[in-house]
Amino acid sequence: GQNIDQPTEMTATEGAIVQINCTYQTSGFNGLFWYQQHAGEAPTFLSYNVLDGLEEKGRFSSFLSRSKGYSYLLLKELQMKDSASYLCAVRDNTNAGKSTFGDGTTLTVKP
Amino acid sequence: DTEVTQTPKHLVMGMTNKKSLKCEQHMGHRAMYWYKQKAKKPPELMFVYSYEKLSINESVPSRFSPECPNSSLLNLHLHALQPEDSALYLCASSLGTGGSSNEGQFFGPGTRLTVL
């Protein structure tokens, strides 16, 4: 099974940098995903990590350490539109196609 | 075409009704998913289809019946639902189900279902 932990809420200031952490315990690991979900909308795929290290995509970066069961999503130059829920999802290798989602971190960006 | 479409956007049904949710993608994705999402909760996986075959059923009650007529379409047939089934139903697709650098899931906008 999977156990995924993320902070429930975070607040940051426009223009700043924020790091959203995700820790997981899994019986088999086959990739970690980050999604953004605005209120009332569907999740949007942000990033994917399967090997250790940092993946950078514009203002967003995601890091993975498989030995520590740890990932973070780094958002730079925060904008008001970044206010959303950020979901960490882990795919296991025992049940192809199944990703288990964490409860999400609600990020509020203030002026 | 890089989107997943779902119809209808909203659906209100009684407990004795039969209705269907539809999902379509034309990205050549071979894996398609149904999720249920309650307010302030993460998406909860219901079904996975891989190459048009049902690969995962997360012990979903039989009043939910999925169907994959072809690689672009996914339906969810609803019958005799309960009020607690009211939720946002999300369809998603991905290139495949294995490990790859680009296999995030692309979600449709969802169908907001209310069961009276």
Image (cartoon, coloured by chain):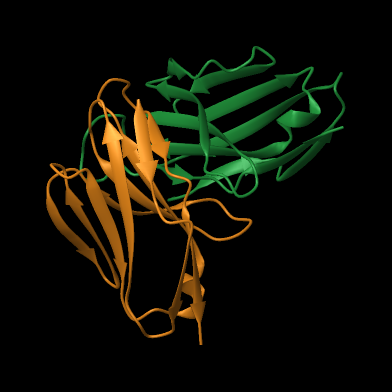
Quarter holding the N terminus of chain A?
Answer: top left
Task: Examine the image and state in which quarter residue B114 appears.
Answer: top right
Drawn side of residue B33 relative to residue A31, left or right:
right
Task: Examine the image and state in which quarter residue B79 appears.
Answer: top right
- Of residues A74 and B95, the one drawn nearer to the viewer in this rendering: A74
Task: Examine the image and state in which quarter residue B83 appears.
Answer: top right
- Residue B56 location, x and y as percent? 43, 18
Q: Colour of chain B?
A: green
**The residue positioned farthest toward the top in the image shown:** B62
Drawn side of residue B81 relative to residue A110, left or right:
right
> Could you tell me which residue is drawn at 16 percent across and 42 percent down?
A66
- Residue A54 location, x and y as percent? 15, 59
Q: Which chain is orange?
A: A
Task: Determine whether A73 is above or below B43 in the image.
Answer: below
Drawn side of residue B17 relative to residue B107, left or right:
right
> Could you tell me which residue is drawn at 43 percent across and 45 percent down?
B106
Asked whether residue B29 is in view, the answer is: no
Task: Determine whether A68 is above or below B65 in the image.
Answer: below
> Could you tell me which residue is drawn at 53 percent across and 29 percent down?
B73
